[in-house]
Amino acid sequence: MVRVKRVYDEASRSDGYRVLVDRIWPRGVRREEAKLDEWLKDLAPSGGLRKWFGHDPDKWQEFRSRYYKELAGKESEIDKLQSIARKRPVTLLYGAKDAEHNNAIALKDYIDCSGRAEK
């Protein structure tokens, strides 16, 4: 099971394996407070894509398409998350204010819907 949660929200035991999937560390969050198991910056969108998107909902579909192309070369990291998710929950953490249009949501969809989740 893969979930998505804002890094600013309180950690809970039900989060399972907590993974930050932003390239940049979230403002105002101390590393100890984040209670991360891992920070996978390489699964975050490239800096150029992140800046182009700017969390503009009108660019969401194009952002997802471009982001998925970037993720296509990162199978080992995706496989690792899927392997963990088969044993316990995985929570993808993000710092964006928009809970519907962010890279963690797109990454979860990629993991869930790409057909790779059945491996």
Image: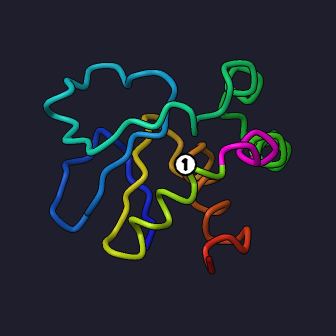
Q: Position of residue 71 (x, y in %)?
A: 71, 45
Q: Residue extending furthest bottom?
A: 118
Magenta segment: 68-74
Is 76 on the left-hand or right-hand side of 6? right
7 shown above or below 88 = above
Residue 19 drawn above or below residue 17: above
Q: Residue at x 19, y 23 (%)?
A: 30
Residue plotted at (34% across, 69% down): 89
Residue to which mark 1 is pinned = 77
- Amino acid at dot 1: Glu
Residue 76: give x, y in percent of width and height. 59, 50
In percent of width and height, residue 90 lies at 37, 62
The image quadrant that residue 66 belongs to is top right
In the rendered image, residue 54, in percent from the top left (x then y), is placed at 68, 26
Image-quadrant location for residue 63:
top right
Query: Around disc 1, counting alpha carbons within 10 Å, would you say few (fewer than 14), some (14 to 19), or many (20 or more)?
Result: some
Give the quadrant of the C terminus.
bottom right
| 47 relative to 97, above or below | above
